[in-house]
Amino acid sequence: MKHLIAPSLLAADFTQLDREVKLVNESKADWLHLDVMDGRFVPNITFGMMIIKALRNICTKPMDVHLMIVEPEKYIEPFRNAGADIISVHYEACPNLHRTIQLIKESGAKAGVALNPHTPVGVLKHLLEDIDLVIIMSVNPGWGGQKFIYESILKIRELKDMITAKNADCLIEVDGGVGLQNAEKILMSGADVLVAGSAVFKSMDPLKTIQQLKNVGQDAVFT
Ligand code: DX5
Ligand code: ZN
């Protein structure tokens, strides 16, 4: 499968959300990544279901909602109703993770689990067949524009081996510090989906950067 690109709106110009989402619509991006933060699971606060619902009206790509919130099980239905196609919760925020995954699936969304940098991938060994994707956090969640934590490469490899051994239908999404400088290495390690915030929205030409990220690993000539 060719890898997927999910630009993260966190790095976009929030005074121009309409323009930024339409840029993603017109691009080669596969999903739009939306980072929900509550000021409790992570120190930062971003946006919630009202903004996502408004964006749903203009976004033509699947919406990939990353919940960095405590007690996410309380908000699965509202985020689904707001238009989320994929909902990911944090392993560290879910004492009853299996049940929360079932809730997401019952809502009709694809279900993902995100792992903080210190959380070993082995904790998901008995869940891999129940989930659609794992987000390997390659920075500490909370802000965009941080440096990629190199140890993540080892986690991606280990997770890929686990998925292959179980023959599970589960994607590996890598989130944080991803850009043209490290995309190839991340993909070679086994990643399927690249989230890119700053690398896309802070670049001179976001459309071109998305295209370049999509072309990584191919012998394409960039224009
Ligand atoms: C961080 C978020 C990321 C963030 C990535 O907590 O989960 O999705 O937007 O931003 P960059 O690509 O700038 O590291
Ligand atoms: Zn994210």
Image (cartoon, grey):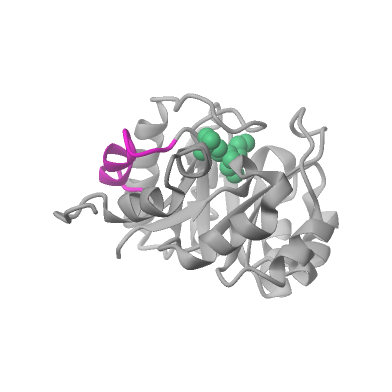
Q: Quadrant of residue 20?
A: bottom right
163 versus 146 height, above or below: below
146 versus 29 height, above or below: above
Q: Where residue 108 sits: x, y (%)?
A: 67, 75
Q: Residue at x 38, y 40 (%)?
A: 156
Q: Within the displayed image, which quadrant is ligand 2 positioned in? A: top right
Q: Where residue 188 sits: x, y (%)?
A: 25, 44
Residue 112 visible within the image:
yes
Q: Is 17 left or right of 124, judged from the image as shown?
A: right
Q: Where residue 52 sits: x, y (%)?
A: 75, 60
The C terminus appears in which quarter of the rendering? bottom left
Task: In this rendered view, identify the residue nearer to me: 129 or 51.
Answer: 51
Q: Quadrant of residue 81?
A: bottom right
Residue 165 visible within the image:
no
Q: Magenta span has 182? A: yes
Q: Quadrant of residue 83?
A: bottom right
Q: Magenta span has 5? A: no
Task: In this rendered view, identify the residue nearer to me: 150 or 24.
Answer: 24
Task: In this rendered view, identify the residue nearer to me: 114 or 62.
Answer: 62
Residues shaded magenta? 178-191
The N terminus appears in which quarter of the rendering? bottom left
Task: In this rendered view, identify the residue nearer to me: 197 or 79.
Answer: 197
